[in-house]
Image (spheres, grey):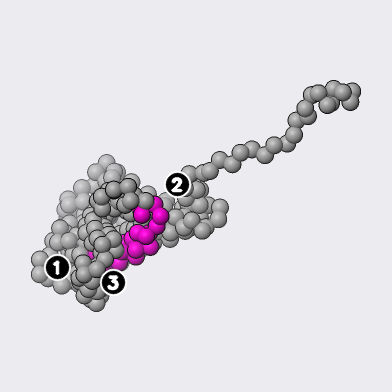
Amino acid sequence: MEILEKVVPQKENVAPAYVPRSPWKMMLKRFKKNRRAMIGFYITSIFVIMALLAPWISPYDPFQYNMKALLHPPSLDHPFGTDQFGRDVLSRIIHGSRISLMIGIVGVGISIIVGVTLGTVAGYFGGILDSIIMRIMDILLAFPGFLLALAIISILGPSMINVMIAIGIFSIPVFARIMRSSVISIKYKEFIEATKSLGGSHFLIIMKHVIPNCIAPIIVLSTMRIATAILTAAGLSFLGLGAQPPSPEWGAMLNEGREYMRSATHLSTVPGLMIMFVVLGFNMLGDGLRDALDPQMKI
């Protein structure tokens, strides 16, 4: 028996080899474990789905007048009531989600393209170019965001396209400064120096190494800026400088409903709640993405 034990090796408990996990899988796992992030994800998903399916899920035409149903309170036929022209408020809310989300996404998209480009150039090349770009950004940051958007709209004129441009312009400095800081923190890393020593061009280094390694804070910031953009667009429309009637934009609906606050409170309450929920959803989603993209967070 002793001889057999010496000849036949005994199985030992060998620990399995460590398999590194993908950073994106780890991020997704951290995101799913964050309850606040998931609530924000569900809220924003509801509004996105509602915006995409608006023509099919809307019970009525949002522009159709019905003089027999003026200022009706919420009922089975009209769950959110009707407005001063007999238009169904629910249908206008559903179609208004398309306008609000489009303004937020397009406006932030403009600021991402311009701000990331300027921040990357300033942080990577430095010198006089960095000073000029950052001083321009400082000038823009000296103005409160809403007042700057208000000034731009006053110059360009009230329209939905001009609101997107105004929101894109006043958000550029934030993206530029965040991107510049991220680029400065990695441009002297070993892998950047190695690429330079191998003859890599500046364009190759920026596109292949710098931007991909600086994109995490931009993703988080863009999510939160969408909420700011939607809130700003609603404020401009409330003042009559954004989407114009009869467009079912939530801020414009608030402006129309303020004259009926005593007799038909639903005209202002419903779009106000929609603005609150969509802004809350994007802010919670941004907080969750920030925690999930932080490599120091433990699963």
Camera-side residue: 22 or 46? 22
SS under mark 1: helix
On residue 153, which mark appears?
A: 1
Q: Position of residue 189 (x, y in %)?
A: 39, 57
Camera-side residue: 263 or 158? 158
Q: Position of residue 15 (x, y in %)?
A: 67, 39
Kindly tell me whether residue 120 is visible in this rendering.
yes
Comparing labels 1 and 2, the label whose residue is closer to the camera: 2
Residue 100 sits in quarter: bottom left
On residue 262, which mark appears?
A: 3
Is residue 110 left or right of 45 when viewed as pictured?
A: left
Does label 3 or label 1 sit earlier along the sequence? 1
Is residue 62 left or right of 27 when viewed as pictured?
A: left
Residue drawn at (15%, 58%), measured in percent from left and top?
A: 161
| Image quadrant occupied by the N terminus | top right
Q: Is residue 224 magenta?
A: no
| Residue linked to disc 2 | 24
Residue drawn at (19%, 60%), measured in percent from left and top?
A: 164
Disc 3 residue type (three-letter): Arg
- Residues in magenta? 170-193
- The local crowd at label 2, few if under 14, some if 14 to 19, many if 20 or more residues have their Cα within 10 Å, is few
Q: Is residue 192 magenta?
A: yes
Q: Position of residue 202 (x, y in %)?
A: 26, 53
Residue drawn at (33%, 54%), measured in percent from left and top?
A: 210
Residue 4 sits in quarter: top right
Comparing labels 3 and 1, the label whose residue is closer to the camera: 1
